[in-house]
Image: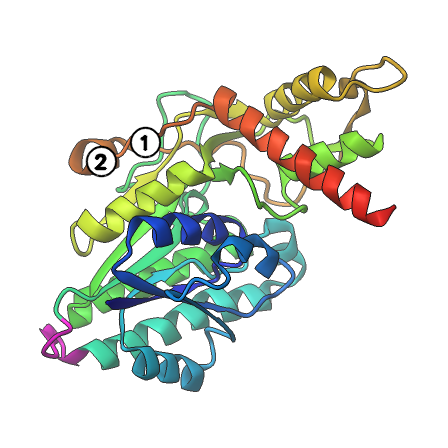
Protein backbone atom coordinates (compact mmCIF):
# COMPACT_ATOMS: atom_id res chain seq x y z
CA UNK A 1 0.00 0.00 0.00
CA UNK A 2 1.24 3.49 -0.88
CA UNK A 3 0.21 6.54 1.17
CA UNK A 4 -0.54 9.74 -0.74
CA UNK A 5 -0.96 13.12 0.94
CA UNK A 6 -3.87 15.14 -0.39
CA UNK A 7 -4.24 18.74 0.77
CA UNK A 8 -7.41 20.80 0.95
CA UNK A 9 -9.73 18.03 -0.18
CA UNK A 10 -12.65 19.10 2.01
CA UNK A 11 -13.10 21.85 -0.56
CA UNK A 12 -14.93 21.71 -3.87
CA UNK A 13 -12.56 19.99 -6.29
CA UNK A 14 -10.81 17.84 -3.72
CA UNK A 15 -14.03 16.46 -2.25
CA UNK A 16 -15.03 15.27 -5.72
CA UNK A 17 -11.55 13.83 -6.25
CA UNK A 18 -11.23 11.77 -3.05
CA UNK A 19 -14.16 9.34 -3.56
CA UNK A 20 -13.23 8.96 -7.23
CA UNK A 21 -9.58 8.20 -6.38
CA UNK A 22 -10.42 5.90 -3.44
CA UNK A 23 -12.66 3.75 -5.59
CA UNK A 24 -10.29 3.60 -8.56
CA UNK A 25 -7.08 2.80 -6.67
CA UNK A 26 -7.52 0.20 -3.89
CA UNK A 27 -3.72 0.11 -3.51
CA UNK A 28 -3.60 3.67 -2.11
CA UNK A 29 -4.05 5.07 1.38
CA UNK A 30 -5.20 8.68 1.19
CA UNK A 31 -4.25 11.17 3.90
CA UNK A 32 -6.30 14.37 3.73
CA UNK A 33 -4.74 17.45 5.39
CA UNK A 34 -7.23 20.32 5.55
CA UNK A 35 -7.51 23.33 7.85
CA UNK A 36 -11.30 23.45 7.33
CA UNK A 37 -11.48 27.15 6.66
CA UNK A 38 -14.88 28.49 5.61
CA UNK A 39 -14.54 26.83 2.17
CA UNK A 40 -13.85 23.35 3.56
CA UNK A 41 -16.65 21.12 4.79
CA UNK A 42 -16.31 17.52 5.98
CA UNK A 43 -19.92 16.90 4.94
CA UNK A 44 -18.51 16.94 1.41
CA UNK A 45 -16.62 13.73 2.26
CA UNK A 46 -19.30 11.81 4.13
CA UNK A 47 -19.11 8.92 1.67
CA UNK A 48 -15.44 8.39 2.59
CA UNK A 49 -15.91 8.24 6.36
CA UNK A 50 -15.23 4.77 7.72
CA UNK A 51 -13.10 3.77 4.74
CA UNK A 52 -9.93 2.25 6.26
CA UNK A 53 -7.83 3.67 3.42
CA UNK A 54 -8.88 7.26 4.12
CA UNK A 55 -7.59 9.42 6.97
CA UNK A 56 -8.55 13.02 7.72
CA UNK A 57 -6.18 15.32 9.62
CA UNK A 58 -7.20 18.86 10.51
CA UNK A 59 -4.23 21.16 10.14
CA UNK A 60 -2.45 23.93 8.28
CA UNK A 61 -0.13 23.24 5.34
CA UNK A 62 2.04 26.09 6.68
CA UNK A 63 2.67 24.11 9.90
CA UNK A 64 6.01 22.53 9.04
CA UNK A 65 6.17 20.40 12.18
CA UNK A 66 2.78 18.87 11.39
CA UNK A 67 3.65 18.25 7.74
CA UNK A 68 6.93 16.57 8.75
CA UNK A 69 5.04 14.39 11.23
CA UNK A 70 2.55 13.31 8.56
CA UNK A 71 5.33 12.37 6.13
CA UNK A 72 7.12 10.22 8.69
CA UNK A 73 4.04 8.78 10.41
CA UNK A 74 2.36 7.67 7.16
CA UNK A 75 5.46 7.29 4.96
CA UNK A 76 4.06 9.64 2.33
CA UNK A 77 5.11 8.68 -1.21
CA UNK A 78 3.12 11.17 -3.25
CA UNK A 79 1.47 14.57 -2.85
CA UNK A 80 -1.51 15.99 -4.73
CA UNK A 81 -1.80 19.58 -3.58
CA UNK A 82 -5.27 21.15 -3.85
CA UNK A 83 -5.21 23.43 -0.79
CA UNK A 84 -5.50 27.10 -1.67
CA UNK A 85 -7.33 30.28 -0.92
CA UNK A 86 -9.18 30.77 -4.17
CA UNK A 87 -11.86 33.46 -4.07
CA UNK A 88 -10.76 36.50 -6.08
CA UNK A 89 -12.99 38.99 -4.23
CA UNK A 90 -11.56 37.85 -0.89
CA UNK A 91 -8.02 38.20 -2.23
CA UNK A 92 -8.71 41.83 -3.09
CA UNK A 93 -9.94 42.50 0.46
CA UNK A 94 -7.30 40.46 2.31
CA UNK A 95 -4.32 39.55 0.09
CA UNK A 96 -2.00 38.55 2.94
CA UNK A 97 -3.94 35.38 3.67
CA UNK A 98 -3.54 34.32 0.05
CA UNK A 99 0.22 34.82 0.10
CA UNK A 100 0.51 32.90 3.37
CA UNK A 101 -1.50 29.86 2.27
CA UNK A 102 -0.80 29.69 -1.43
CA UNK A 103 2.88 30.66 -1.42
CA UNK A 104 4.25 29.76 2.01
CA UNK A 105 2.07 26.68 2.34
CA UNK A 106 3.17 25.32 -1.02
CA UNK A 107 6.82 25.99 -0.13
CA UNK A 108 6.45 24.11 3.18
CA UNK A 109 4.94 21.06 1.47
CA UNK A 110 7.60 21.05 -1.25
CA UNK A 111 10.52 21.45 1.11
CA UNK A 112 9.35 18.73 3.48
CA UNK A 113 8.75 16.38 0.54
CA UNK A 114 12.20 17.12 -0.87
CA UNK A 115 13.95 16.38 2.40
CA UNK A 116 11.89 13.24 3.01
CA UNK A 117 12.25 11.74 -0.47
CA UNK A 118 15.71 12.85 -1.56
CA UNK A 119 19.26 12.48 -0.25
CA UNK A 120 20.53 15.47 -2.21
CA UNK A 121 19.66 17.26 -5.46
CA UNK A 122 18.78 14.78 -8.23
CA UNK A 123 19.31 11.76 -5.94
CA UNK A 124 16.29 10.02 -4.44
CA UNK A 125 16.54 7.99 -1.27
CA UNK A 126 16.17 4.21 -1.79
CA UNK A 127 12.46 3.27 -2.18
CA UNK A 128 11.42 6.87 -2.92
CA UNK A 129 12.15 6.91 -6.65
CA UNK A 130 9.05 7.99 -8.50
CA UNK A 131 7.51 9.92 -5.61
CA UNK A 132 5.66 12.77 -7.26
CA UNK A 133 4.47 16.23 -6.19
CA UNK A 134 1.41 17.30 -8.20
CA UNK A 135 0.48 20.96 -7.85
CA UNK A 136 -3.06 22.03 -8.78
CA UNK A 137 -3.14 25.56 -10.20
CA UNK A 138 -5.41 27.78 -12.28
CA UNK A 139 -5.69 29.41 -15.69
CA UNK A 140 -5.85 32.79 -13.94
CA UNK A 141 -2.04 32.84 -13.68
CA UNK A 142 -1.99 33.66 -17.40
CA UNK A 143 -3.96 36.90 -17.02
CA UNK A 144 -6.62 37.78 -19.55
CA UNK A 145 -7.23 37.00 -23.23
CA UNK A 146 -8.52 38.99 -26.15
CA UNK A 147 -12.04 38.26 -27.38
CA UNK A 148 -10.61 36.50 -30.46
CA UNK A 149 -11.84 32.89 -30.11
CA UNK A 150 -8.55 31.60 -31.53
CA UNK A 151 -6.65 33.26 -28.68
CA UNK A 152 -6.22 30.52 -26.04
CA UNK A 153 -4.03 29.85 -23.03
CA UNK A 154 -1.38 27.23 -23.75
CA UNK A 155 1.34 25.85 -21.51
CA UNK A 156 3.78 28.35 -23.04
CA UNK A 157 1.59 31.43 -22.44
CA UNK A 158 3.57 33.94 -20.32
CA UNK A 159 2.31 34.44 -16.78
CA UNK A 160 0.52 37.76 -16.23
CA UNK A 161 -1.60 37.45 -13.06
CA UNK A 162 -3.94 40.37 -12.39
CA UNK A 163 -5.33 39.73 -8.89
CA UNK A 164 -3.69 38.94 -5.55
CA UNK A 165 -5.21 35.46 -5.83
CA UNK A 166 -3.76 34.71 -9.27
CA UNK A 167 -0.44 36.30 -8.31
CA UNK A 168 -0.20 34.02 -5.28
CA UNK A 169 -0.95 30.98 -7.45
CA UNK A 170 1.59 32.07 -10.05
CA UNK A 171 4.15 32.42 -7.28
CA UNK A 172 3.43 28.92 -6.00
CA UNK A 173 3.76 27.55 -9.54
CA UNK A 174 7.21 29.13 -9.79
CA UNK A 175 8.29 27.61 -6.48
CA UNK A 176 7.21 24.16 -7.69
CA UNK A 177 9.15 24.69 -10.90
CA UNK A 178 12.24 25.74 -8.95
CA UNK A 179 12.24 22.52 -6.92
CA UNK A 180 12.11 20.52 -10.12
CA UNK A 181 14.87 22.50 -11.81
CA UNK A 182 17.15 23.01 -8.80
CA UNK A 183 16.70 19.78 -6.86
CA UNK A 184 15.41 17.35 -9.47
CA UNK A 185 12.13 16.68 -7.68
CA UNK A 186 9.48 14.86 -9.66
CA UNK A 187 6.85 17.57 -10.02
CA UNK A 188 3.94 18.26 -12.34
CA UNK A 189 1.60 21.24 -12.51
CA UNK A 190 -1.93 21.37 -13.88
CA UNK A 191 -3.67 24.65 -14.67
CA UNK A 192 -7.43 24.31 -14.94
CA UNK A 193 -10.25 26.48 -16.20
CA UNK A 194 -13.36 27.37 -14.15
CA UNK A 195 -14.78 24.27 -12.50
CA UNK A 196 -18.47 23.68 -11.82
CA UNK A 197 -20.46 20.79 -10.42
CA UNK A 198 -21.56 19.29 -7.07
CA UNK A 199 -20.15 20.46 -3.73
CA UNK A 200 -19.01 23.92 -4.84
CA UNK A 201 -19.06 26.62 -2.15
CA UNK A 202 -22.15 28.82 -2.10
CA UNK A 203 -20.06 31.96 -2.77
CA UNK A 204 -19.24 30.92 -6.34
CA UNK A 205 -21.18 32.06 -9.41
CA UNK A 206 -23.30 29.02 -10.25
CA UNK A 207 -24.47 28.18 -6.70
CA UNK A 208 -25.13 31.90 -6.15
CA UNK A 209 -27.39 32.03 -9.21
CA UNK A 210 -29.34 28.93 -8.15
CA UNK A 211 -29.65 29.90 -4.48
CA UNK A 212 -30.86 33.44 -5.14
CA UNK A 213 -33.28 32.31 -7.82
CA UNK A 214 -34.91 29.76 -5.53
CA UNK A 215 -35.30 32.43 -2.81
CA UNK A 216 -36.71 34.96 -5.28
CA UNK A 217 -33.79 37.27 -4.58
CA UNK A 218 -31.97 39.37 -7.19
CA UNK A 219 -29.37 37.36 -9.12
CA UNK A 220 -26.22 39.53 -9.09
CA UNK A 221 -24.11 39.65 -12.25
CA UNK A 222 -20.91 41.70 -12.37
CA UNK A 223 -20.59 44.53 -14.89
CA UNK A 224 -22.22 43.83 -18.24
CA UNK A 225 -22.18 40.05 -17.76
CA UNK A 226 -20.05 39.52 -20.84
CA UNK A 227 -16.92 38.23 -19.11
CA UNK A 228 -16.06 34.87 -20.68
CA UNK A 229 -14.86 31.72 -18.92
CA UNK A 230 -14.08 28.21 -20.12
CA UNK A 231 -16.16 25.87 -17.93
CA UNK A 232 -14.93 22.42 -16.87
CA UNK A 233 -17.12 19.84 -15.12
CA UNK A 234 -15.40 18.96 -11.85
CA UNK A 235 -15.29 15.19 -12.40
CA UNK A 236 -13.59 15.74 -15.77
CA UNK A 237 -10.99 17.80 -13.92
CA UNK A 238 -10.51 14.98 -11.40
CA UNK A 239 -9.92 12.52 -14.22
CA UNK A 240 -7.38 14.89 -15.75
CA UNK A 241 -5.52 15.16 -12.45
CA UNK A 242 -5.49 11.37 -12.19
CA UNK A 243 -4.00 10.98 -15.68
CA UNK A 244 -1.33 13.65 -15.15
CA UNK A 245 -0.35 12.34 -11.71
CA UNK A 246 0.15 8.82 -13.07
CA UNK A 247 1.41 9.36 -16.61
CA UNK A 248 2.44 13.01 -17.01
CA UNK A 249 6.07 13.73 -17.81
CA UNK A 250 8.07 15.04 -14.86
CA UNK A 251 8.61 18.79 -14.84
CA UNK A 252 5.78 19.40 -17.30
CA UNK A 253 2.74 21.67 -17.10
CA UNK A 254 -0.62 20.48 -18.44
CA UNK A 255 -3.64 22.70 -19.03
CA UNK A 256 -7.05 21.15 -18.32
CA UNK A 257 -9.99 22.91 -19.98
CA UNK A 258 -13.51 22.01 -20.99
CA UNK A 259 -13.70 23.76 -24.39
CA UNK A 260 -16.94 25.26 -23.08
CA UNK A 261 -16.63 29.04 -23.31
CA UNK A 262 -19.62 30.92 -21.94
CA UNK A 263 -20.29 34.50 -20.88
CA UNK A 264 -21.73 34.99 -17.42
CA UNK A 265 -24.96 36.03 -19.13
CA UNK A 266 -25.07 32.70 -20.98
CA UNK A 267 -24.46 30.87 -17.69
CA UNK A 268 -27.32 32.60 -15.91
CA UNK A 269 -29.59 32.16 -18.93
CA UNK A 270 -28.91 28.41 -19.06
CA UNK A 271 -29.52 27.97 -15.33
CA UNK A 272 -32.71 30.03 -15.23
CA UNK A 273 -34.05 28.13 -18.24
CA UNK A 274 -33.52 24.83 -16.39
CA UNK A 275 -35.09 26.24 -13.21
CA UNK A 276 -38.09 27.58 -15.13
CA UNK A 277 -38.69 24.03 -16.35
CA UNK A 278 -37.93 22.06 -13.17
CA UNK A 279 -39.22 24.39 -10.41
CA UNK A 280 -41.39 27.08 -12.01
CA UNK A 281 -42.27 30.08 -9.85
CA UNK A 282 -45.78 30.18 -8.42
CA UNK A 283 -46.31 33.64 -9.94
CA UNK A 284 -45.63 32.28 -13.43
CA UNK A 285 -42.70 34.61 -14.03
CA UNK A 286 -39.33 33.51 -15.36
CA UNK A 287 -36.35 33.48 -13.03
CA UNK A 288 -34.62 35.56 -15.71
CA UNK A 289 -36.49 38.60 -14.38
CA UNK A 290 -34.39 38.36 -11.20
CA UNK A 291 -31.11 39.07 -13.05
CA UNK A 292 -29.53 42.25 -11.66
CA UNK A 293 -26.33 43.90 -12.84
CA UNK A 294 -23.99 45.07 -10.06
CA UNK A 295 -20.78 47.08 -10.00
CA UNK A 296 -17.92 45.16 -11.59
CA UNK A 297 -15.14 43.97 -9.33
CA UNK A 298 -11.63 45.42 -9.47
CA UNK A 299 -9.25 43.79 -11.97
CA UNK A 300 -11.97 41.59 -13.44
CA UNK A 301 -10.30 39.68 -16.31
CA UNK A 302 -12.40 39.75 -19.47
CA UNK A 303 -11.80 36.27 -20.84
CA UNK A 304 -10.11 32.98 -19.96
CA UNK A 305 -10.00 29.98 -22.26
CA UNK A 306 -7.70 26.96 -22.18
CA UNK A 307 -6.22 24.97 -25.03
CA UNK A 308 -6.08 21.40 -23.65
CA UNK A 309 -4.49 19.95 -26.81
CA UNK A 310 -1.29 18.88 -25.02
CA UNK A 311 -3.19 16.86 -22.41
CA UNK A 312 -5.50 15.40 -25.03
CA UNK A 313 -2.79 14.42 -27.53
CA UNK A 314 0.00 13.33 -25.18
CA UNK A 315 -1.99 11.65 -22.37
CA UNK A 316 -5.31 10.83 -24.03
CA UNK A 317 -7.58 12.85 -21.74
CA UNK A 318 -11.02 13.91 -22.97
CA UNK A 319 -13.79 15.78 -21.18
CA UNK A 320 -16.84 13.53 -20.86
CA UNK A 321 -19.31 16.34 -20.15
CA UNK A 322 -20.37 19.16 -22.42
CA UNK A 323 -21.62 22.26 -20.66
CA UNK A 324 -25.18 21.40 -21.66
CA UNK A 325 -25.02 18.00 -19.97
CA UNK A 326 -22.94 19.10 -17.00
CA UNK A 327 -25.05 22.09 -16.07
CA UNK A 328 -28.21 19.97 -15.85
CA UNK A 329 -26.46 17.55 -13.46
CA UNK A 330 -25.17 20.50 -11.45
CA UNK A 331 -28.55 22.24 -11.11
CA UNK A 332 -30.21 18.97 -10.10
CA UNK A 333 -27.60 18.40 -7.39
CA UNK A 334 -28.13 21.87 -5.93
CA UNK A 335 -31.90 21.57 -6.07
CA UNK A 336 -31.63 18.40 -3.99
CA UNK A 337 -29.20 20.09 -1.58
CA UNK A 338 -31.26 23.22 -1.04
CA UNK A 339 -34.49 21.23 -0.71
CA UNK A 340 -32.85 19.08 1.96
CA UNK A 341 -31.60 22.17 3.82
CA UNK A 342 -35.06 23.74 3.61
CA UNK A 343 -36.65 20.60 5.05
CA UNK A 344 -34.18 20.59 7.95
CA UNK A 345 -34.94 24.23 8.76
CA UNK A 346 -38.68 23.65 9.05
Left or right of 70? Residue 92 is: right
Residue beneath the point at 46% across and 45% down: 140
Evaluate if marks 2 and 1 touch, with contact meaning CB atoms under 8 Å apart: yes
Point out residue 226 in the picture as x, y percentages from the top left corner: 60, 25
Say whether residue 221 is left or right of residue 162.
Answer: right
- Please tell me the numbered disc located at residue 310: 2
Residue 248 visible within the image: no
Helix, strand, or loop for circle 1? loop
In the image, residue 219 above or below residue 343: above
Q: Could you say which quadrant of the image residue 65 lies in?
A: bottom left
* Mark 2 to mark 1 CA distance (whole Å): 8 Å
Secondary structure of the residue carrying numbered label 2: helix
- The residue closer to the viewer here, 140 or 161, is 140
Q: Residues within 10 Å of mark 2 (few under 14, many from 20)?
A: some
Residue 331's spot in the image, x, y percent? 62, 30
Find the magenta span and give its range.
118-128
Between 58 and 312, the one lying in front of the other is: 58
Label 1 Cα crowd, 10 Å radius (few <14 / some 14-19 / many 20+): many
Q: Residue at x 59, y 52 (%)?
A: 87
Residue 146 is at least partly visible in this image? yes
Residue at the right extreme, as displayed: 283
Q: Position of residue 162 (x, y in %)?
A: 51, 48
Residue on which disc 1 sits = 307
Amino acid sequence: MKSILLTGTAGFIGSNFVPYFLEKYPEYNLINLDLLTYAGNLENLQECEGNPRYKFIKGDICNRQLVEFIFSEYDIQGVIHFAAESHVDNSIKNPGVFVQTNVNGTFTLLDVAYKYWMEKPFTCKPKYEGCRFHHISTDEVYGTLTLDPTDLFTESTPYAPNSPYSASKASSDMIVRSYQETYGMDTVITNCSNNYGPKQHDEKLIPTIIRNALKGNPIPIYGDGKNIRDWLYVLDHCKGIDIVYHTGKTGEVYNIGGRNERTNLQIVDAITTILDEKVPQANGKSYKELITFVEDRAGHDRRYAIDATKLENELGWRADETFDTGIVKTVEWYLAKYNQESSRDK
